[in-house]
Image (cartoon, rainbow, N blue to C red):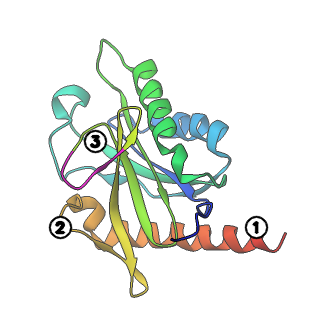
Amino acid sequence: MGKIKTPEPVTPIASVFTSDEKLFESAKEILSKELGPCIYESTVLPFNHTDYYTAEMGSGLKRRIFAFEKLVDPSKLPALKLWSNSIEEDWAVGGKRQVNIDVGYVSLGKLVLASTKNHSHRIYLGEGIYGEVTLRFVGGEFQPWPWTYPDYASLQYRKIFAEIRRLHREKLRTKSTH
């Protein structure tokens, strides 16, 4: 029988997309109140791998990926997703979202994203939320799975998450020396 251990804390991330780039700063501010200061912010990235959100959110969507200082227990992912969904609802205009906030976390071995949608490769975490291992860290770099969204599978995104992983590793080292 294996020994039960407390899981290593993880670095929370948020992938935010919107057609109104001014909302990135507001999203970062509200996320930082819960997750600590932003330690990583990507450049503005095109959101052009799907038109799934166009009817609701309009065209010309842009994305930014943020990572935050606070180390969290990975079991908090459902609560983070419910909270980010409430932000989306609060900011909706006429029932249409102005911003989409996908939360997840980076650990040393993977990028996990939360979803309200079930699929064969997602595991139910509770409270109506599923978890997906979107990228895995193998051979010194993040690698996609067959189900990984094309944007997350791209080299550009994998480099972003490699940098967030590097920052995460530094936080873990600092935490263990204190």
The disc at residue 61 is 3
Label 3 crowd (10 A; few <14 / some 14-19 / many >=20): some
Kind of residue indicated by mark 1:
Lys
Count of marks overlaid on the render: 3
Task: Indicate left or right for 129 with 5 as reference.
Answer: left
Q: Secondary structure at mark 2?
A: loop
Q: Residues within 10 Å of mark 2 (few under 14, many from 20)?
A: few
| Local secondary structure at mark 3 | loop
How far apart in space, not on screen, are marks 2 and 3 (Cα)?
A: 25 Å
Name the amino acid type tagged 3.
Answer: Leu
Query: Measured from the top left, where is residue 164 in percent x and y?
Result: 52, 66
Tell me, yes or no, whether the highlighted magenta stretch contains residue 110: no
Picture residue at 29% right of the left edge, 20% below the top:
96
Contact, CB < 8 Å: mark 1 with mark 2? Answer: no
Choose the circle earlier in sequence order: 2 or 3: 3
Query: Which residue is farthest bottom?
Result: 139
Q: Secondary structure at mark 1?
A: helix
Q: Position of residue 90 (x, y in %)?
A: 45, 19
The front one of 132 and 2 is 2
Q: Answer with mark 1 or mark 3, whichever residue precedes in sequence.
A: 3
Q: Which mark is residue 146?
A: 2
Q: Quarter of the image holding residue 94?
A: top left
- The residue at which mark 1 appears reads as 175
Q: At label 2, which amino acid type do we have?
A: Pro
Give the extent of the magenta segment: 119-124
Indicate the position of residue 1 as horizontal and vertical percent values: 51, 71
Between marks 1 and 3, how big is the CA–CA gap? 37 Å
Can you tell which mark lies on residue 156?
none
Q: Position of residue 111 (x, y in %)?
A: 41, 62
Q: Nearer the viewer, mark 2 or mark 3?
A: 2
Magenta stretch, main secondary structure class: loop
Residue at 47 percent across and 27 percent down: it is 87
